[in-house]
Image (spheres, grey):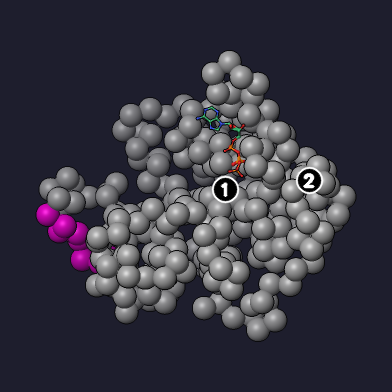
Amino acid sequence: MLEIANLIKRYGQDEPVLKGLDLVVEDNSVVAIVGASGAGKSTMLRCINRLVEPSSGSIRLNGTELVALRGAALRRARRKIGMVFQGFNLIDRLTVMENVLAGRLGYVSLFQAVTRRFPAEDIDRAFALMERVGIAHYANKRADELSGGERQRVGVVRALMQEPEVLLADEPTASLDPRTSEQIMMLLQSLASELSLPVLINIHNVAQAKAYTERIVGLRHGTMIFDGVPAEFDKAALEAIYGGIEAPDDELTAAPAGIASGEES
Ligand SMILES: Nc1ncnc2c1ncn2[C@@H]1O[C@H](COP(=O)(O)OP(=O)(O)OP(=O)(O)O)[C@@H](O)[C@H]1O
């Protein structure tokens, strides 16, 4: 379970970008974080994995306070936080398997990492996860030979190799076509329940947030102004969050293509 309490982040002397956020995400729960550009979505995710230092507040992951951690304790805690990125963040010249095994770097010795002698159980786990998301047959392909959707699956598997206790996805579908985006959202949704993980997804596409998550959190200028189930996310909520500027009307109604067939990949 992820528990965020009174999280404040101020960059320099500027007005806080996060103004006292409270959010509890249970295991097995997929939450979409929506909000206009600059609302603080990325800052929130980055505070959780401590790529950004919170100014104050508390972030607890399964009881461990992350905000207080330093040095080796912080490195150990970071292993438990899986991250999926908009741009995939793969190493192009390495194979799929090598990229996936990078998720184990926090667990193996420097010698094992440099000589790429990963334990057999890591290789087994890598194959099992690649099989699960449908990329096992690409294990020896270079990452830059894959399509965007395949690359994002590699990114997801790499995050899962960390044996994370929470999965954070920052605009994971923004570089993908609509159909592939839906497949990745469905995958994240299924993995949350299969692995009993809390999953937080920053996402601009409100229709996808509504279709593939069970809870939507809306940020505006660093304050949470909506927290509810997709059915409650109506035009008024959209207006409140985006100020009527950014999201067109059909954001709420666009029917994702994959839903009708229930397909995932
Ligand atoms: N390193 C930084 N230093 C100073 N200000 C920053 C820094 N990172 C983000 N900000 C500011 O914090 C605010 C929130 O940014 P953030 O990236 O968290 O928003 P966002 O909701 O993720 O936006 P987007 O949807 O465009 O990614 C913005 O005003 C941004 O300019």
Q: In the displayed image of the protein, which residue is found farthest to the top?
A: 13
Q: Are marks 1 and 2 in contact (CB under 8 Å)?
A: no
Q: Residue 64's x, y, as percent? A: 48, 37
Q: What residue type is labelled 2?
A: Ile
Picture residue at 69% right of the left edge, 44% below the top: 36
Tag 1: residue type? Met
Does residue 120 show up magenta in the picture? yes
User: In terms of secondary structure, where does tag 2 sit?
Assistant: loop
Looking at the picture, how far across and down is residue 79, in whole percent?
Answer: 37, 46
Image quarter for ligand 1 equals top right
Q: Can residue 260 be seen in this view?
A: yes
C-alpha distance separating marks 1 and 2: 34 Å
The residue carrying mark 1 is: 1
State the extent of the magenta-drawn residues as a range. 115-124
What residue is at 68 percent from the left and 28 percent from the top? 19
- Residue 245, numbered label: 2
Look at discs 1 and 2 and give the one toward the viewer. Answer: 2
69 to 132, vertically: above or below: above
Q: Does the residue labelled 1 lie within 8 Å of ligand 1?
A: no
248 with respect to 128 (left or right): right
